[in-house]
Amino acid sequence: MDYRNNILKDIENAEKIYIAGHINPDGDAVGSVLALALYFVRLGKKPCVLLENIPERFKFFYGTQLWYNGDYDDIAPDIFFAVDCGDKKRLGKAGEIFDRSKMTYCIDHHATNTGFADIDIINAKASSASEIVYELLKENGFDAEKDIEIAADIYAGIVFDTGGFRHNCTGRRTHEIAGALVEGGVDTSTIHSRVLFEHTLPQAKLFGAALNNMKHKDGVSYTSLTTKEIEGCGCTSEDLDGIVDFLLNLDVSDCAVLVTQRSENTAKASVRSKQFPIADIIVALGGGGHKLAAGVTCEGSADAVADMIVKKIIEGKNNG
Ligand code: 5GP
Ligand code: MN
C-alpha cells in the first residue's frame, strides 16, 4: 500500500491537533495514538491525545503526558486524527470533537472500515494501527527506530494486536518493522510481558469466574460475566484481556465468545475464530473488527447476548 499523504503539509499550519483512539482503548489504540502524538511533538507541535482512559497496564507507554482529560465542550480542532477506529461510533465522546474539526483523518487497519474522515488511510492488511503509523512516519522521512520512545510505543502496539506475532494479521512486513525497532533498542521482553502476560490477582479471579461459567456448543466455547461478577472479583471491563483468547485456544474450539455486561441492559461481545469468518455476523449486529476477531455491543443481558451470538455463529458455520 502507498502511504503517501500530505500530513506534513496539513499539520504545518495547524495549531489545534487532536489524536483519538477507540473507546475501551487497547494496546494498539494507545500505542498508535501516542506514537503519532510524539511524532508531532518532534515536529514542534503541541498535539492533544483523546482517549477515554489509559488502562493501568499501558501507563508505561511513552507520551501519556499528552493525554487530555479535560472538558470536551469547547474543543474545535484544526485537524483531527481518528486512529485504530473501525467506525465513527468507536470514537465515543470524541466523536463530537471529530464533527467540529476543520479537517479529519482516519488511520486504521480494520477490514470493516468503510472510511468516515476527509482523508482515509486504511490498510486492512496491516497488523495494527501501530504498523501503519510506522509506515506513515517512514513515508514522511522519519525513522521511528531512531526515536526510542516512539519505537517502543509502536512495538508495543504491534505486539498487542498480533498477540505477540501469532495472529494471522502478522505479515512479513510486520516482522521487518519489528526487526528495525529491535535494532533501535526497544526492550522486547519487558514489552511482551507487560502487554500480554502480566495479570493482577483480581484478574486471575475473574479468569476463574469466566471459566466457571464457560459453555461449549458445536465448536463454540463461550462465557458471560455480569457486572456483579466482574466487580465481585475487584475488576472492571479493563481486566478482560486474555479470556476470550484462552477459550479459542482450547482444542475443542473453532470459535470463542466472551460477553460482559456493561450497563443495565447492554452487553459487549468479543468474538474470536480460528478459521470461520465472523466479521459479517458481527457487522450485521452493528459491530465490527476483523475476519477472525470482532466485537459488538448489544442490548440485553450478557447471557442472552451470548446465546444469540453463539446461535448465529453455529448457523453460519453449518451453512458455510
Ligand atoms: P475486542 O473483542 O477485543 O473488543 O475487539 C476485537 C476487534 O474488533 C478489535 O479490532 C476491535 O477494534 C474491534 N471491535 C470491537 N468492538 C467493536 C465495535 O463495537 N465496533 C467496531 N466497529 N469494532 C469493534
Ligand atoms: Mn488495532
Image: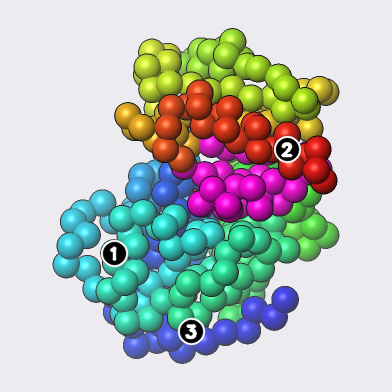
Label 1, secondary structure: give it.
Answer: helix
Mark number displayed over residue 8: 3
Q: Earlier in the sequence, mark 2 or mark 1?
A: 1
Task: Give x and y (percent) for residue 319.
Answer: 80, 43
Which part of the image, by quadrant, shows the N terminus?
bottom right
- Tell me if 220 is positioned left or right of 53 in this view: right
| Residue positioned 21% across, 54% down in the render | 70
Image: 237 above or below 144: above
Q: Disc 1 or disc 3, which is closer to the eye?
A: 1
Q: Which residue is mark 1?
A: 96
Pointer 2 or 3: first along the chain = 3
Q: Secondary structure at mark 2?
A: helix
Instruction: Say the numbered circle drawn on residue 156.
Output: none
Tell me the amino acid under the disc marked 2.
Glu
Whole-number angstrom distance, CA of label 1 to CA of label 3: 25 Å
Viewer-side residue, 209 vs 66: 209
Residue 43 lies, in percent from the top left, at 43, 76
Q: Is residue 47 above or below residue 53?
A: below
In this picture, which residue range is highlighted in magenta?
Answer: 269-297
* Residue denoted by label 2: 315
Say whether residue 209 is visible. Answer: yes
